[in-house]
Image (tube, rainbow, N blue to C red):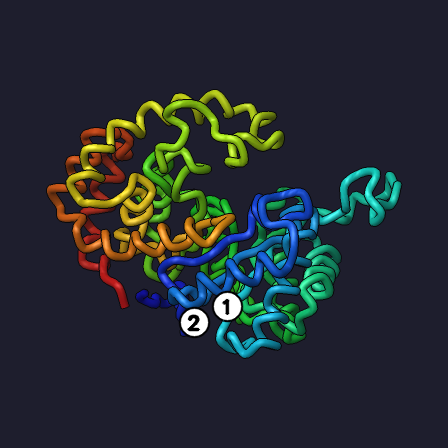
Amino acid sequence: MKYNRLGDTGLLVSELSYGSWVTFQDDGQVPDPEIAYKLMKKAYEGGVNFFDNAEAYGMGAAELLMGEAVALGIERNAWTREDLVLSTKIFFGSMPPRGSSGYVKSRKSVNRIGLSRKHIIEGTKASLRRMKLKYVDLVFCHRYDPLCNMEEVVRSFNTLIDMGLCFYWGTSEWTAQQIQEAKGVAERLGLVGPSFDQPEYNLFAREKVEVEFAQLYPSIGLTTWSPLASGVLTGKYSKGVPEGSRLSLKEFKARPDYKYFMRLAEQTEKLRPVAAKLNCTLGQLALAWCLANPNVSTVIGGASNEKQIEENLGALEVVDKLTPEILKEIDQIMGTKPKLSRSMAQVQYRLRPLRHKL
């Protein structure tokens, strides 16, 4: 396992990390703290130090489970709090589902979401209560809020840092322009700006990381999500949807892009000869491809059992096998490499001397 700087901070994160989206919930694939602990321990023993979460994952259930798992690890001397990099994300809120014991019927919950100063601070405190932590290392703006001016957002996240509730803040699925605006406001006010973003990045989703964000590196780190495109790039959906997989879950079947995912499964099969040539699985090939991007600080992978974690960790051995010739072959097979406009190509040419990993 290698460790990378997270943007322009001094924080080091493992190149492969572990996420709790979908899997860590009461009715999900990891329903109790003991299982969550075993999975986190397996990842940690493989070198993973960054564990990702959000207030909205499982409507707070993911934070409850991860918090219990972290406590079990400390109690059993598996790790110390200082060994871990833990995160949460603020924007969507965490009201428990209608009909559950924690649900409160109210039409006045408009401030439970967004990036107002009120929700940033209250939401972060609520996340810490669920995780039973005094602080998290990272807090993300889970999305951009068009109702809040940037100065309010920047000042509020700096308040979290000053209160000792987090060490760094960043964004998730923001545009390059929005990130640059936040950095500009922070610089003008003498405050801490965002140091990282969490964009989707995989063989099907490349535009933002490879083109739009080009001018932001290396001051912005990336904690990329969905490296396997919700499992599609593992090849397991080539012959249908296995029971218990992500695409078998009702929340995925309800997504408007569900049929699109199934079409991507057909495209994935074309990569199988490349994986065979490298003596790895399709999933390991897809993960290694993400890891090979020098602008990616860490790749967040999910897993509902120890076997999946072992397979994910195996991708680390594949990265060095991705020669320029292999990468070109993958591009030709997938046909998903972003095409640069004439002006953007000129900008990229100018930025070539800056492409290095500190």
Left/right placement of residue 78 relative to residue 71 reads left
Q: Is residue 228 left or right of residue 23?
A: left
Q: Nearer the viewer, mark 2 or mark 1?
A: 1
Q: Can you tell which quarter of the image residue 127 is in?
A: bottom right
Residue at image position (50%, 45%) is 173
**Residue 341 in view:** no
| Position of residue 104 measured from the top left corner of the image (x, y, whole percent) | 87, 45
Q: Is residue 6 above or below residue 333?
A: below
Residue that carries the numbered disc 1 in the rendered image: 85
Closer to the chain start, of discs 2 and 1, is 2
Instruction: Name the one closer to the observer, 306 or 43.
Output: 306
Tell me the distance, in whole angstroms, between the alpha carbons under discs 2 and 1: 9 Å
Q: Is residue 325 above or below residue 12?
A: above
- Residue depicted at x 49% and y 65%: 41
Outermost residue, left side? 325
Cβ–Cβ under 8 Å for marks 2 and 1: yes
Amino acid beneath label 1: Val
Amino acid type of disc 2? Leu
Residue 167, above or below 58? below
Instruction: From the top left corner, tell me how far across and down residue 343 is, in percent.
Output: 25, 37
Residue 272, x across and y down, in percent: 24, 33
Q: Which residue is mark 2?
A: 11
Q: Quadrant of the C terminus?
A: bottom left
Q: Quadrant of residue 244?
A: top right
- Residue 15 image offset from top left, x and y in percent: 35, 60
